[in-house]
Image (cartoon, helix red, strand yellow):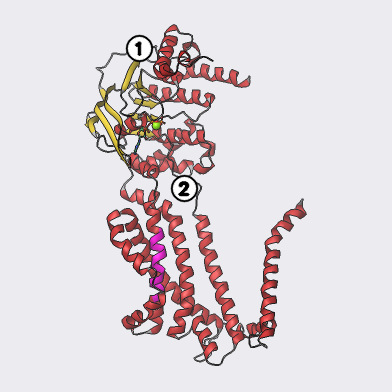
């Protein structure tokens, strides 16, 4: 019962704290942030060549928030990998800020699906080392301030001296988020960034993500993998639904034309929201609808 | 409650005492059966007290047991130190490059099983000096475990950790210092711990061959020049205790630098 009340409060504060976007602002010509062209990724395995994703094309505008959704193992992380430069496509190309991706770079901040924290460093050091490596033109005092700001944002300042082995899954995830944000990249690649979080923390993190995005005049491009339809709708401009692998392709791209700032509590009563929700649900579970199960 | 905790902490000491009692009993029995050809514990204890008198005596013909111990430790320290300084970088290079691993690994695998004593004549030929030859032997036998464990540690760095370095623009140096070394340090320490254990075992044999001042030669001297068996037993106990201490030191280092994944 307490939780329910708390959730509402958080969501209320959330709606209030997200600064109102100046809708009167002169529309700038939209720039392309990420341009994925005919990407195919195949892996050599002992059982032969496995094609994870095939011939995927997707263009993402600067400042757009796009969610990738699809069944486990369909190739979401692989596709993200081609954008981050961690995965070499077998075919096709990815342009990021008009430059061909050949290797990872600090213009893209990554939250890895498995957190990837360095177990020998404290929470603080995990972020500081990355800030220190990625940001060249700042003094060590400024870098420390950045670490502090980002750790406070994810509510982990009191835990800054703990080692990753002493953290819960959700806490690790928040460290990974703080780490990606701390280097202030123009593109954020988030692979199930909120998957291990409870509903309450998740809501807070959604708001923090949008706050950050707003603070930067909505110029950061965000690609996020998620399994959570509500989350995808609340955060995104577009939701990319993928087919199942092997050789997965894009099944459909669903626009989310809901106006921002969005209020989590109100949005779910919006008929447009319910329509989108239904559509996504159908795209994801059409094969497994109740009608398909033979009745007893 | 308090009592039970202090009792529990005394338990290892209690078990140790039982172990000592059993060994002491067997020892006493053997002494009895050999008609004190092997001296019994109390006779050995008297010799022990004699031996550790004036341990640091360093006269031309009488050397205290401490002087001998330090002399052995010094040889081990030099051989093991130089060996480790070479083995760690080599292990790191082997671990980071599949090609270098493919070149060096077969050689290591051939040389590793060779008894360290076999290197002694080679050292003698090289240095024309038998104490130097035993240092050389220690040097050689300190190489393999450290090299093998270091290269294993470096080659086993998980992709996740490497990805952090790639994604966040770590320089080569930063990757080395902040990812490669911390990850492989526990493996390096395992190698060093194995190496020092072998080195300490081998020095005793080496000094039997080389002569000079040291615990190994001390055992040899007493054993074959009609010396005292009690002194040999005392030396064995001291060698064992020092080996245990060396091992504990590296175990503590291992503990200090291990981390929960
Ligand atoms: N390095 C690799 N070698 C071989 N196969 C791989 C490799 N990486 C991914 N795959 C395969 O590619 C497919 C897609 O994997 P991917 O990790 O992209 O899925 P995902 O959509 O992110 O799944 P999840 O939702 O469970 O995270 C899987 O079948 C996987 O086995
Ligand atoms: Mg994945």
Label 1 beta carbon less than 8 Å to ligand 2: no
Describe residue A40's horizontal placement relative to residue B259 as left or right: left
Query: Which circle, 1 or 2, is nearer the viewer?
Result: 2
Q: Residue furthest front?
A: A296
Residue at 55% of width from left, 64% of height from top? B248
Q: Assign a secondary structure to mark 2.
A: loop
Describe residue B193's horizontal placement relative to residue A1 as left or right: left
Counting other residues with Cα less than 10 Å from the Cα at mark 2, is it few (<14), some (14-19), or many (20 or more)?
Answer: many
What secondary structure characterizes most of the magenta part?
helix
Question: Does the stretch in magenta take in A58?
Answer: no
- Measure the alpha-carbon separation of dots 1 and 2: 47 Å
> Can residue A162 be seen in the rendering of this structure?
no
The residue that disc 1 covers is A23
> Is A160 or A226 nearer to us in this picture?
A226
Which range of residues does the magenta coloring cover? B137-149
Residue B62: image x %, image y %? Answer: 53, 90
Residue A293: image x %, image y %? Answer: 48, 16
Can you say which quadrant of the picture contains the C terminus of chain A?
top right
Q: Where B133 sits versus A224, above or below?
A: below
Residue at 65% of width from left, 83% of height from top? B44
Q: Assign a secondary structure to mark 1.
A: loop
Residue at 50% of width from left, 81% of height from top? B216
Residue A54: image x %, image y %? Answer: 27, 28
Q: Where B109 sits versus B171, above or below?
A: below
> Is A245 or B259 nearer to us in this picture?
A245
> Is B80 or B123 nearer to us in this picture?
B123
> Can residue A17 be seen in the rendering of this structure?
yes
Q: Quadrant of residue B239?
A: bottom right
- The chain letter for the residue carrying disc 1 is A
Q: Earlier in the sequence, mark 1 or mark 2?
A: 1
The residue that disc 2 covers is A120
Q: Where B88 sits versus A11, above or below?
A: below
């Amino acid at each position: 019962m307490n939780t329910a009340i708390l959730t509402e409060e958080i969501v209320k504060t959330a709606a209030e704290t997200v600064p109102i976007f100046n809708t009167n602002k002169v529309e700038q010509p939209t720039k392309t942030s990420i341009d994925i062209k005919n990407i195919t990724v195949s892996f050599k395995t002992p059982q032969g060549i496995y094609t994870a994703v095939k011939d995927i094309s997707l263009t993402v505008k600067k400042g757009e928030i796009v969610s990738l959704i699809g069944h486990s193992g369909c190739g979401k992380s692989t596709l993200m990998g081609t954008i981050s430069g961690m995965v070499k496509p077998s075919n096709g190309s990815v342009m990021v800020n008009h430059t061909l991706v050949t290797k990872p770079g600090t213009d893209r901040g990554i939250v890895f699906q498995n957190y990837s924290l360095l177990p020998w460093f404290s929470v603080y050091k995990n972020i500081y080392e990355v800030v220190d490596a990625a940001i060249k033109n700042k003094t060590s005092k400024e870098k420390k301030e950045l670490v502090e700001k980002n750790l406070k944002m994810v509510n982990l300042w009191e835990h800054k001296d703990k080692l990753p082995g002493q953290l819960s899954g959700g806490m690790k995830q928040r460290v990974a988020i703080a780490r990606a944000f701390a280097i202030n990249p123009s593109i954020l690649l988030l692979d199930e960034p909120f998957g291990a979080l409870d509903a309450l923390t998740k809501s807070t993190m959604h708001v923090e993500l949008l706050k950050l995005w707003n603070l930067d005049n909505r110029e950061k491009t965000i690609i996020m993998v998620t399994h959570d339809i509500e989350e995808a709708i609340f955060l995104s401009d577009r939701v990319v639904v993928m087919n199942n692998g092997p050789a997965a392709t894009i099944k459909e791209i669903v626009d989310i034309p809901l106006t921002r700032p969005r209020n989590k509590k109100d949005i779910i009563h919006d008929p447009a929201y319910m329509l989108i929700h239904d559509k996504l649900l159908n795209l994801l579970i059409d094969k497994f609808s109740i009608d398909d199960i033979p009745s007893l | 409650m308090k009592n039970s905790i202090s009792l529990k902490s005394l338990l290892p000491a209690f078990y140790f005492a039982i172990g000592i009692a059993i060994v002491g009993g067997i020892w006493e029995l053997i002494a009895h059966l050999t008609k004190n050809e092997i001296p019994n514990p109390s006779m050995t204890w008297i010799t022990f007290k004699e031996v550790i008198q004036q341990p640091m005596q360093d006269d031309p013909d009488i050397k205290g047991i401490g002087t001998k111990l330090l002399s052995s430790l010094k040889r081990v320290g030099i051989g093991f130190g130089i060996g480790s300084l070479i083995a760690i970088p080599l292990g790191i290079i082997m671990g980071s490059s599949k090609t270098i691993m493919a070149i060096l690994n077969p050689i290591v695998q051939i040389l590793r099983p060779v008894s360290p004593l076999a290197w002694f004549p080679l050292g003698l030929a090289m240095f024309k000096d038998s104490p130097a030859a035993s240092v050389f032997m220690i040097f050689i036998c300190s190489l393999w475990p450290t090299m093998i464990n270091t290269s294993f540690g470096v080659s086993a760095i998980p992709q996740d950790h490497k990805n952090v370095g790639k994604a966040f623009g770590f320089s080569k140096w930063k990757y080395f210092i902040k990812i490669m070394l911390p990850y492989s340090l526990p493996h390096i320490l395992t190698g060093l711990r194995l190496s020092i254990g072998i080195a300490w075992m081998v020095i005793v044999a080496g000094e039997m061959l080389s002569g000079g001042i040291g615990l190994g030669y001390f055992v040899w001297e007493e054993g074959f020049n009609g010396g005292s068996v009690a002194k040999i037993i005392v030396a064995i106990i001291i060698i064992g205790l020092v080996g245990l201490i060396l091992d504990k030191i590296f175990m503590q280092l291992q503990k200090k630098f291990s981390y929960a994944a």
